C-alpha cells in the first residue's frame, strides 16, 4: 500500500497555476507530459531545465513517438516553452490555446487542437488500393530483374546483369548488400576454383576475351589493379588525362627513389589530390610543382627540424611545411609558414 508523505519530498506550485490547469481541458497523454516537466522543474526548485525525451518516457510510460508528438503540441499551444533546448511551463495561462470550460459546464472552443490519444508507436502507412497496385508493380519488376541462378555450390540463387555488364549474384531476393548477400560471378568462380576466401590486395580479375559474361575459369586471370587498368586503357586506345598526370608524378617519384609506402591505390589517390591542391593564392599546384615538392622533400631529409615526408600521403599533409623549411633556409631562420 502506497503512503506518500510530504516529508519524503513535494513539488511546490502556485495554487493559481494549479487552478488554471483545472479549468483547461488537456489531453491525457499531453497532461502526463506537462506533469513530468512540472516534476523535473518545480520539483527541483527550478524554473526550467534540460529534459530529455527518455526521462519523460521513463516517468510516464508513454511511447517515444507519442511523447514527441504531445510535447510538440504543448509547445504549439503555448503551455510549454522551449528556449535553448530547455523546457519550462508557461505561467501566463492567458496565452494558452486550449479548450476552456465556462461556469455553465459548456465547452467553448478557442481552436480545434487535437492530440491523438493512444499508447502505440507512430503509425505506419497502410496499404491503400493504390499503394497495393504500386507495390505489386515493383515486385513484378524486381522479380523480372533478378532471375533464378543455378549455383553448383548452392549458395547464390539469383542473378542479374548490372549496368557495367557484369553478372551479379545474390543469395536472397531482394538482396541486402550490407550483409554480404551479393557478389560478381567472375569473382565467385575464381575464388572457388582456386580455393581462396578473398582476392589478394590491390588485385582484379580480368576477362581474357573481353566478354564480361564469359566467366569460365579458363577465361579469367588475376592482375594487379594497375596492370588491369593499363591493359584496358591500351585495349580501348583511351587516354585518361587525370591518370596520365598521376602516372607522370608517380614515375618521376620512382626515378628519384621517392618512397611509395602504402598501396598503389592509396599513392595514386594522394598524388591526384596533391596535384589538385591549391596554394595560399588559390592556384592549383599541378604536376610541375608537385615534382618540385618531391625533389625538395628529398633534399630536406636528415636536416634538423625538417618535416618527415616518406610518401605521397605525408607529402599531401606536409607540403606547406616543406615550403616553410625551404623559405627558412633562404632567410637563415628555422622557417616561416607561407
Image (cartoon, helix red, strand yellow):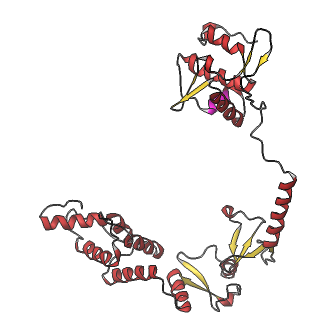
Q: Which residues are magenta?
A: 53-58
Which of the 4 image quadrants contains residue 206?
bottom right
Q: Residue at (66%, 20%) from the top-left corner?
A: 35
Number of callouts in the render? 0
Is residue 146 visible to us here?
no
Q: Is residue 27 magenta?
A: no
* Foreground pick, 156 / 123: 123
Is residue 104 visible to us here?
yes
Whole-percent x, y for residue 264 in the image? 46, 76
Whole-percent x, y for residue 151 in the image? 79, 77
The answer to whether residue 157 is left or right of residue 56 is: right
Question: Dividing the image into 4 quarters, which one contains the C terminus?
Answer: bottom left
* Residue 102, placed above or below residue 242: above
Q: Residue at (82%, 60%) from the top-left corner?
A: 134
The answer to whether residue 328 is left or right of residue 193 is: left
The residue sitting at the left extreme is 332
Q: Residue at (23%, 70%) from the top-left corner?
A: 300
Whole-percent x, y for residue 241 in the image? 45, 82
Magenta segment, prevailing SS (helix, strand or loop): helix
The residue sitting at the right extreme is 129
* Foreground pick, 65 / 262: 65
Question: Dividing the image into 4 quarters, which one contains the N terminus?
Answer: top right
Which of the 4 image quadrants contains residue 153?
bottom right
Whole-percent x, y for residue 315 in the image? 34, 68
Which of the 4 image quadrants contains residue 171?
bottom right
Q: Residue at (32%, 84%) from the top-left corner?
A: 255
* Foreground pick, 77 / 329: 77
* Residue 163, placed above or below residue 19: below
Amino acid at each position: 500500500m502506497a503512503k506518500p508523505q510530504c516529508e519524503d519530498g513535494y513539488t511546490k506550485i502556485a495554487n493559481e497555476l494549479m487552478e488554471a490547469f483545472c479549468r483547461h481541458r488537456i489531453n491525457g497523454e499531453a497532461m502526463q507530459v506537462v506533469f513530468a516537466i512540472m516534476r523535473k522543474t518545480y520539483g527541483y526548485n527550478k524554473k526550467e531545465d534540460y529534459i530529455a525525451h527518455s526521462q519523460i518516457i521513463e516517468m510516464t510510460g508513454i511511447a517515444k513517438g507519442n511523447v514527441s508528438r504531445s510535447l510538440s503540441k504543448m509547445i504549439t499551444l503555448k503551455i510549454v516553452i522551449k528556449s535553448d533546448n530547455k523546457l519550462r511551463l508557461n505561467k501566463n495561462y492567458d496565452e494558452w490555446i486550449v479548450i476552456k470550460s465556462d461556469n455553465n459546464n459548456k465547452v467553448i472552443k478557442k481552436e480545434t487542437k487535437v492530440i491523438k490519444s493512444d499508447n502505440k508507436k507512430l503509425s505506419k502507412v497502410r496499404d491503400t488500393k493504390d499503394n497495393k497496385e504500386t507495390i505489386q508493380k515493383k515486385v513484378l519488376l524486381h522479380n523480372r530483374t533478378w532471375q533464378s541462378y543455378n549455383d553448383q555450390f548452392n549458395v547464390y540463387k539469383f542473378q542479374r546483369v548490372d549496368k557495367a555488364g557484369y553478372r551479379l549474384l545474390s543469395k536472397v531476393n531482394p538482396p541486402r548488400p550490407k550483409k554480404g548477400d551479393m557478389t560478381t560471378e567472375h569473382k565467385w568462380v575464381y575464388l572457388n576454383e582456386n580455393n581462396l576466401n578473398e582476392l589478394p590486395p590491390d588485385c582484379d580479375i580480368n576477362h581474357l576475351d573481353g566478354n564480361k559474361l564469359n566467366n569460365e575459369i579458363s577465361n579469367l586471370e588475376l592482375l594487379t589493379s594497375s596492370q588491369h587498368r593499363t591493359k584496358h586503357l591500351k585495349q580501348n586506345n583511351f587516354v585518361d588525362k587525370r591518370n596520365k598526370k598521376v602516372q607522370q608524378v608517380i614515375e618521376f617519384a620512382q626515378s628519384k627513389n621517392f618512397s611509395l609506402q602504402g598501396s598503389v591505390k592509396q599513392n595514386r589517390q594522394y598524388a591526384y589530390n596533391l596535384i589538385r591542391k591549391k596554394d595560399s593564392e588559390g592556384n592549383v599546384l599541378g604536376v610541375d610543382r608537385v615534382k618540385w615538392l618531391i625533389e625538395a622533400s628529398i633534399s630536406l631529409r636528415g636536416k634538423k627540424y625538417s618535416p618527415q615526408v616518406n610518401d605521397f600521403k605525408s607529402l599531401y599533409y606536409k607540403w606547406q611545411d616543406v615550403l616553410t623549411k625551404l623559405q627558412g633556409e633562404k632567410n637563415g631562420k628555422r622557417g616561416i609558414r607561407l
